[in-house]
Image (cartoon, helix red, strand yellow):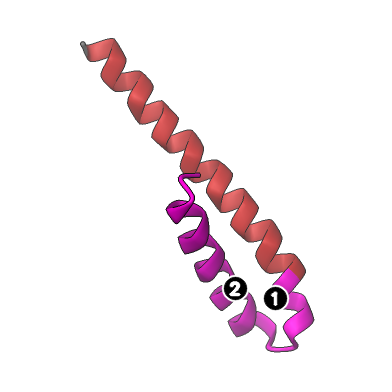
Amino acid sequence: MRVKHIFTQRKIAMRKIIRALLAGWGAKKLGGKTGCGCFGTIIVFIILWWLLSNLGI
């Protein structure tokens, strides 16, 4: 039972890493084009993070 718990935690951690990488890449691509600078990039990152979490990534 303990091993199953460790694998579940690793799976969740990997999903968060992948979600962060995807949201960061998307924020860099989309946030840079909005012309809002750093603030716009952060907003795009938060929106993408939320969207990806709702999709189950």
Q: Residue at x 49, y 50 (%)?
A: 55
Q: Which residue is mark 1?
A: 31
| SS at circle 2 | helix
Q: Quadrant of residue 18?
A: top right
Q: On screen, 42 above or below 54?
A: below
Q: Secondary structure at mark 1?
A: helix
Q: Say above or below: 35 vs 7.
A: below
- Amino acid carrying label 2: it is Val
State the residue at coordinates (34%, 25%).
8
Q: Left or right of 10: which side holds 38?
A: right
| Residue at 76%, 77% in the rendered image | 32
Contact? badges 2 and 1 (CB < 8 Å):
yes
Of the numbered discs in the image, which one, if any, rests on residue 44? 2
The residue type indicated by label 1 comes to: Gly
Highlighted magenta segment, given as a residue range: 30-57
Q: Is residue 26 above or below residue 39?
A: above
Estimate the x, y position of residue 34 in percent, counting from the top left: 73, 84
In the rendered structure, does residue 32 fall within the stretch colored magenta? yes
